[in-house]
Amino acid sequence: MPSRSFHVAVCTALLGCSSLPGGPGVDAGPVLPACEVLSKADAPVISEGGRLSLEMVPSAAVVEWSLIDAGPFTAEKIDPSHLQLKAPYGRMGVFTLAGRVDCGDEKKTQEWTVTIRALSWSRVSTWTEGVDGPLNREYGSMWVDDADPDRVLLFAGYVYKPKQFTPATDLWEVNLVDGKWKQLTPVNEPPHFVGGRMALAPESGQALYSGGLDEAKETPYQLSRFSYRPGQLRWESEPLAADSPRQGDYQPGFFYDAKRSRYLSICGANNEVGRHCLVRSYTPDASGGRWAALPLAPGATPPARNGHFYAYDAETDRFILFGGDGQGTTLGDTWALELAQTPARWVQLTAQPAPMKRRNGAYVLDPVGHRFVIFGGTVTGATSSPEMWALDLDRGKERWERVLVADRPPDRTSGVAVYDAKRQRIVMGFGNSEVADYPDLWALQL
């Protein structure tokens, strides 16, 4: 029997597709010859460093299939029907992969192609500071509206006019479709704290803002809830629990741990203990919520720091920590806090090659490519750290990669970034360097 081409159906993490012909909304098509594989998509395209799940949809005659040549990809058969590919960085083009199909009385090798395309930057928005957009700033909070993926909000930060470190608690939104900014006015006063962190709440349209420096550059405890729906902009102080800490934190790691219905605040700096890497949990409830130290397993823990790069990786259920401003030094270590374990356990990741030490840069997690991306930062506060790096988050395969992209934004310190899930890209902007400051927004297409 002549050899037939070996086809695959493509499913990224954000797209659904039926696993078998004839499923809901899928035309069953013609009866397949023996040892044939249904094709439901053209040859797939993946970005450099990206990840792709291929769904194998064989006929009933296929007993087994296996991958025999993955080309430049790292490949893993994650179950009998799915193959996961991860593309390398810096190798673009069309590549041929080969698999072996076993139909009992017939065995044959079949091929298919996958294209790796280059990552690319483009401008999202340009504006005149204070006229049709916000003043440039550092240490602000930026997030995507969970109900409107075209709407990104920006709150607070230190602006550079009339001089650097001028505190601001203004609120803006930008439309990712046309790049236009609009200043917003809540119905009540926002918390006058800068350098805190915003975490999206499980309630739609709400977020919690924790920590920061007040106008006297002190760190008294503060935790505020913000309702950010259009026409419903309101700040409220979270009820003060009896066991609330006396101090908040400047530049902590702060996020909502959805699997355990709690918020975690990790590392930071305050007027009581200075820099630290404590882990505290906050659980809201009808009586005003409660704070508690998170129990940790014995073993090594990260040195004290603030201004670190961090993300929560839901796929592996762990908090990822890199670098930051340590006690008299800038750090360049990488850690994971294993949250599924009881008690939680810190593990130092010896992913190599590691980026140069840095603090106060832009960072974001790409859940589709399963990588933690950092951009810029500084070692000394006098110059900006160069280039973009990405940490592969596949468990046991953690590795930092230097990512070179043509026409990238200028290197900078104190930029801010968010993940634009609708368009599968990173949006990054703001910050400054030794030569300029940058009131801009860029997108890295993933």
Image (tube, rainbow, N blue to C red):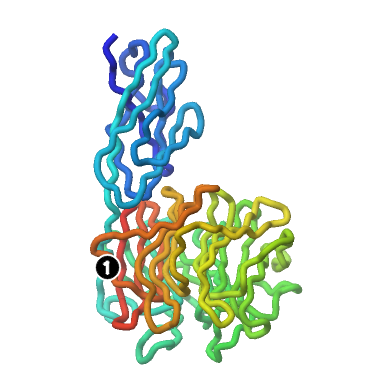
Name the quarter where the N terminus is drawn.
top left
Relative to 69, 289 lies left or right: right
Q: Is residue 237 visible?
A: no
- Residue at 34% across / 37% down in the picture? 71
How many marks overall? 1
Is 426 on the left-hand or right-hand side of 226?
A: left
Counting from the top left corner in percent of width and height, residue 88 is at 36, 47
In this image, 54 relative to 281: left or right? left
Query: Nearest the camera: 73 or 22?
Result: 73
Does 50 appear above or below 443? above
Residue 274, quarter of picture: bottom right
Q: Which residue is mark 1?
A: 125
Q: Residue at x 52, y 83 (%)?
A: 192
Displayed quadrant of residue 62: top left
Is any atom of residue 71 visible in this view?
Answer: yes
The picture places residue 299, in percent across and down from the top left corner, at: 71, 61
Residue 102, quarter of picture: top left
Q: Amino acid at mark 1?
A: Ser
Q: Position of residue 229 (x, y in %)?
A: 45, 64
Residue furthest toward the right? 242
Image position, residue 136 (x, y; %): 35, 79
- Residue displayed at 74% across by 61% down: 298
Element assignment for label 1:
strand
Q: Write the residue at 60% across / 83% down.
A: 219
In depth, the one of 260 and 175 nearer the eye is 260
The front one of 97 and 431 is 97
Q: Residues within 10 Å of mark 1 (few under 14, many from 20)?
A: many
